[in-house]
Image: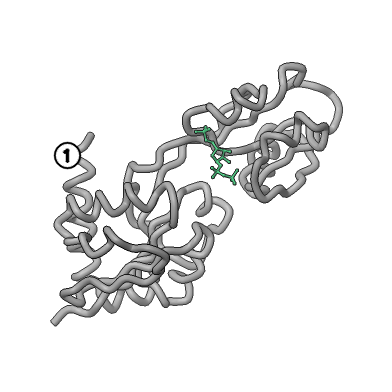
Amino acid sequence: MSQCLTIALTKGRLEKKALKLFTQAGLDCSFMEDKKRKLIFKSPNGEFQFLLVKAADVITYVKHGVADLGIVGKDVLLENLYGYYEMLDLKIGQCRFSVASTEDYVVNDYKRKIIATKYPAVASQHFREKGEDVEIIKIEGSVEIAPVLGLADAIVDIVETGTTLKENGLQIYEDICPISARLIVNKASLKRNKQQIFQLIDQLEEVIEGGE
Ligand code: PRP
């Protein structure tokens, strides 16, 4: 009998899309329909269980081997580069990293800029690659208000529809890179459950390629 695989899912926006993908790949996820406030779900056939956690915690559970697999955005992976294998681009949750600010922002200004972001590693790397020394201020959310209120000159954040930027009077000045959800795996688990994990990856790949 195959071992029960534990899969950590990012709660919220990605969760529904990920479950749809797993269902299309042949996993019966109907037991997730009436989930209420529960956070751990074991499939009736005992083949897998889902954990619902915050994005950064998906990586923590996978790193520590509590979860065999995880689904998390590339944005969060870029801030946490090590301790797991990134196996597959799931092509869901697609958005991008951008530099945005108010209309008076000057991209090539001579003064040292202050950048507010939830993603300090991504922001630092972007400006370092441009040869620009900036000050980074870490913000936990609602980053869009930082340039409006004068905390920062600009923000580095994820943009999906662009609605949040627009509604807060910001515009995009630079695109940094595209982002999408990835399947990550615990290193030891990949060795232990190689066949089972690669079979799941093959099934997912078939759905993803079929959808392109
Ligand atoms: C993200 C991001 C933007 C918004 C972009 O925030 O930080 O604020 O989504 O989406 P849009 O381009 O479709 O408007 P999230 O909803 O994750 O909440 P947060 O502000 O608490 O981080």
**Which quadrant holds residue 86?**
bottom left
**Tag 1: Cα neighbours inside 10 Å, few (<14), some, or many (≥20)?**
few
**Which quadrant holds residue 156?**
top right
Q: In terms of depth relative to the viewer, which is nearer, 139 or 75?
A: 139
The percent position of residue 92, horizontal first and vertical second, equals: 35, 43
Position of residue 24 relative to residue 8, above or below, is above
Quadrant holding the N terminus: bottom left
Q: Residue at x 32, y 52 (%)?
A: 18
Q: Residue at x 81, y 37 (%)?
A: 151
Position of residue 147 relative to residue 75, above or below, is above
Left or right: residue 110 compared with residue 20: right
Left or right: residue 23 compared with residue 54: left
The percent position of residue 89, horizontal first and vertical second, equals: 34, 47
Position of residue 121 relative to residue 2, above or below, is above
**Callout 1 secondary element:** helix
**Which quadrant holds residue 9?**
bottom left
Q: Is mark 1 within 8 Å of ligand 1?
A: no
Q: How many marks?
A: 1
- Residue of label 1: 210
Quadrant holding the C terminus: top left
Q: Residue at x 39, y 69 (%)?
A: 38
The percent position of residue 49, horizontal first and vertical second, equals: 29, 71
Q: Amino acid at mark 1?
A: Gly
